Image: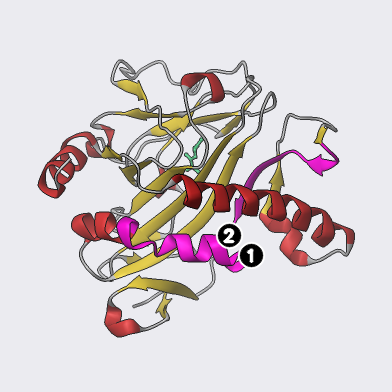
């Protein structure tokens, strides 16, 4: 798709798919790094390192392990744990896509790995990211990069087309058992809900108000995803009363080459 067509799709549907963002070699590097991060989780946990809290176990997998490694649901702040995933956030092809939607100055709000493990992957209830993020206006862009093939069988992402225009709503809890439905609401028309199957290396970009979620993974194939959320300098940091007053965000493009920007609650 040409950049203008991508932007029109994004504005109309709240998301669009970018094919072949990463090469097979780049995907292989990410997959090896995910294995290293699983081993790191074990080491950090064994020595009581606070960074172990960035690794979240699959909530409904009981005591299951995979080849002696934990069955992880997600890893937060991957940019601080891994050079591979720090660099991926600023991948030139990715930055070109995000800049075409948000402009040339880009800050990174979030770097996460969603690991929907084989057999145990839980469902991810429908939600809008901006409901959880202390950022205003709610106009961030998430890039969800498939590091394995993703299909309905291993719990690919599902998006409600056009839902970024609905305003913020309550959707219920996010971490759901494999047999639970993706939302408790029965007052909404879910007919626009679309599976977004991806090949490894493809990505889907979506608006932080787009309603999305993902089904269970009962298949023998894991679904690995690198998630990054970006925002332009026009977005403000607005923590609630409990949140830290100041927060530092990595710069991934523009902003005169600065490494980070610190935003304060009142700025
Ligand atoms: O990739 C998924 O399965 C869902 C992830 C997601 O929606 C999120 O972390 O906000």
**Does the magenta segment cover residue 214?**
no
Residue at position x 64%, y 50% in the image: 32
Q: Is residue 171 visible?
A: no
- Where does the magenta region start and end? 67-94
Neighbor class of circle 2 (other Cα within 10 Å; few <14, some 14-19, many 20+) is many
Q: Could you tell me how far apart the alpha carbons at marks 1 and 2 are, in whole angstroms?
A: 5 Å
Q: Secondary structure at mark 2?
A: helix
Q: Residue 17, how many percent across, how many down?
A: 30, 37
Q: Quadrant of residue 144?
A: top left
Residue designated by label 1: 81
Residue 165 vs residue 204: left or right?
left
Q: Quadrant of residue 177?
A: top right
Residue at position x 28%, y 53% in the image: 139
Circle number at residue 78 = 2
Residue 3 vs residue 192: left or right?
left
Mark 1 in CB contact with mark 2 (< 8 angstroms): yes
């Amino acid at each position: 798709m040409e950049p203008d067509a991508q932007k029109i799709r994004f504005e109309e549907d709240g998301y669009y798919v970018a094919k072949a963002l990463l090469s097979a070699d780049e995907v292989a590097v990410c997959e090896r790094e995910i294995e290293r991060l699983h081993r790191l989780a074990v080491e950090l946990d064994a020595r009581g390192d606070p960074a172990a809290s960035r690794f979240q176990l699959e909530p409904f997998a009981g005591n299951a392990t995979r080849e002696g490694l934990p069955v992880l649901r997600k890893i937060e702040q991957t940019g601080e744990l891994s050079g591979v995933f720090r660099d991926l956030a600023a991948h030139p092809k990715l930055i070109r896509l995000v800049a075409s939607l948000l402009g040339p100055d880009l800050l990174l709000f979030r770097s996460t790995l969603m690991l929907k493990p084989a057999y145990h992957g839980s469902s991810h209830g429908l939600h809008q990211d901006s409901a959880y993020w202390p950022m205003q206006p709610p106009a961030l862009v998430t890039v969800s990069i498939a590091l394995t093939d993703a299909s309905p069988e291993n719990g690919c992402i599902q998006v409600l087309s056009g839902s970024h225009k609905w305003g913020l709503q309550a959707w219920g809890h996010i971490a759901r058992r494999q047999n639970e439905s993706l939302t408790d609401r029965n007052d909404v028309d879910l007919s626009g809900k679309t599976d977004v199957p991806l090949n490894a290396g493809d990505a889907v970009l979506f608006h932080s108000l787009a309603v999305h979620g993902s089904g269970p993974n009962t298949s023998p194939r894991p679904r690995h995803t690198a998630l990054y959320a970006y925002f332009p300098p026009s977005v403000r940091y607005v923590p609630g009363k409990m949140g830290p007053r100041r927060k530092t965000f990595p710069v991934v493009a523009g902003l005169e080459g600065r490494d980070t920007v610190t935003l304060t609650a009142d700025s």
